[in-house]
Amino acid sequence: MNILGALNLENFDAPFVEPTTVDGVSAAQLLAKIEARNPLSRIIYVIWDNAAYHKGPDVREFLKRSDCRIRLIQLPPYCPHLNPIERLWAVMHQYVTRNHYYPTQKQFADAVLRFFRETLPNEWQTFRDQVSYNFRVVNHDKSRVLVFPA
């Protein structure tokens, strides 16, 4: 099972694609999905790690389009702790894989997809503090106070 996904930290929208192979083509498909889900945004900043397919010819072609609204921000090498999507994967594992047994690969795949299609949109407020930029959100009322970790 392959999933290539993104996460909007403002509203926890999590577009993803389910490619046969994770490569430049699927990365460009994800970028297209991100653009489509943000029609009102003039510029969309996407923070990506340094996977080779994130920098390949398919992605470069996608970004060269005159109407492209995506701007990539590359993380430094070997810094998964700076990537919020890695934290979302950890939350998904908490909900789906830890202490769960799935007799078939299909049942496992269905559980993972159910997390992204149902659990995440419906329950994101319960784990939003776990998926952030090293900030801890103290107050969820009308204003948000961010505390930087020591």
Image: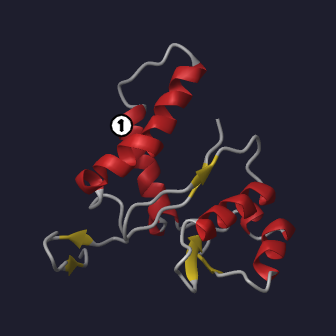
Residue that badge 1 annotates? 95
Residue in view at x 43 percent, y 31 percent: 97
In the displayed image of the protein, which residue is found farthest to the top? 103
Q: What colouring does the structure picture have?
A: secondary structure
Q: Which of 6 and 82 is in front in this view?
A: 6
**Residue 148, image x and y in percent?**
25, 78
Looking at this view, is 88 or 50 the one in front? 88
Across and down, in percent, residue 48 comes to 60, 69
| Residue shown at the point (16%, 80%) measured from the top left | 143
Left or right of residue 145, residue 92 in this image: right
Q: Crowdedness of circle 1 by 10 Å Cα count: few (<14), some, many (20+)?
A: some
Three-letter residue code for mark 1: Tyr
The residue at 40%/68% (across/down) is 9
Q: What element carries label 1?
A: helix
State which quarter of the image contains the N terminus: top right
Residue 55 point in image, percent of width and height: 76, 71
Vertical comparison of 74 with 91: above or below: below
